[in-house]
Image (tube, rainbow, N blue to C red):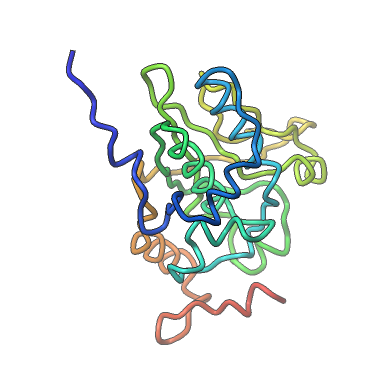
Amino acid sequence: MEQKDFSEYLSTTEIIDFQHADFQSYSERWSRGSTTLENAVNIYNFVRDDLMYDPFNIRFEVEKVRISNVVKGDRGHCIDKAMVFIGLCRNEGLPARLGLARVQNHMGTERLEAILQTNVLVPHGYAEVYLEDRWVKCTPAFNKELCDKLGVEPLEFNGTEDSVFQAYDRDGGDFMQYLEDYGGFADLPRELVFDLFQKEYPHLLDDQGQFKSDLLKR
């Protein structure tokens, strides 16, 4: 049988700098299990609920999006949280990578939709971890507290099945819908992320192509 090379999905990178001292301190906070599968699930649950989901916390600067910086705070958007999950997995020897997608939001987050001028979110970030000879997808974005507020069940992950997004809320209404998937990445593809953002939300960039972060504070 051909030996798979997972080295790029186990390595530290410019953004997923899990060997940084600050991230190593953070990695001591989740509870280890007795198996690899348990560890993956425990990491997922920890990241999902330890960092509050904040879709307004958008940054493009390298030093701000590094996971060693993200974990200094108490919140992050979907890509932030997916990369923290990936860093914790790699720190335990579990191959993991970032997935990016284009999704449609039916959550009724009026403030966010007013700023974006659409209910399409791009790029949405999720994670993939290699468990029991296959890649499994998971999305540790929405913490339990936020799910309660939105009227949806927290997204669970068992390590054997893909856990991407709740399709419906508790009342059966539409919640989220995947429109396009851009694939998996060993590190954050910053140029692709910016290009997608620029294409979908040109009004959030100035004439020099700089992000108008003040728009997210209104």
Above/below status of 4 relative to 59: above
Please indicate whether residue 84 sits to the left or right of residue 215 in the image.
left
Q: Quadrant of residue 191?
A: bottom left
Q: Measuring 37% from the left and 62% from the top, which residue is drawn there?
A: 190
Q: Position of residue 200 (x, y in %)?
A: 46, 64
Pick the residue in front: 137 or 121. Answer: 137
Q: Position of residue 128 (x, y in %)?
A: 44, 34
Please indicate whether residue 196 sits to the left or right of residue 57 in the image.
left
- The furthest residue to the top: 1
Q: Quadrant of residue 61?
A: bottom left
Q: Quadrant of residue 2?
A: top left
Above/below status of 142 relative to 53: above
Above/below status of 199 relative to 211: above
Pick the residue in front: 210 or 129. Answer: 129
Q: Position of residue 188 (x, y in %)?
A: 39, 54
Q: Measuring 45% from the left and 80% from the top, which residue is drawn there?
A: 210
- The furthest residue to the left: 2
Quadrant for the N terminus in the image: top left
Q: Measuring 57% from the left and 59% from the top, which residue is drawn there?
A: 70
Q: Measuring 48% from the left and 36% from the top, which residue is drawn there?
A: 89
- The furthest residue to the bottom: 207
Q: Position of residue 102 (x, y in %)?
A: 47, 49
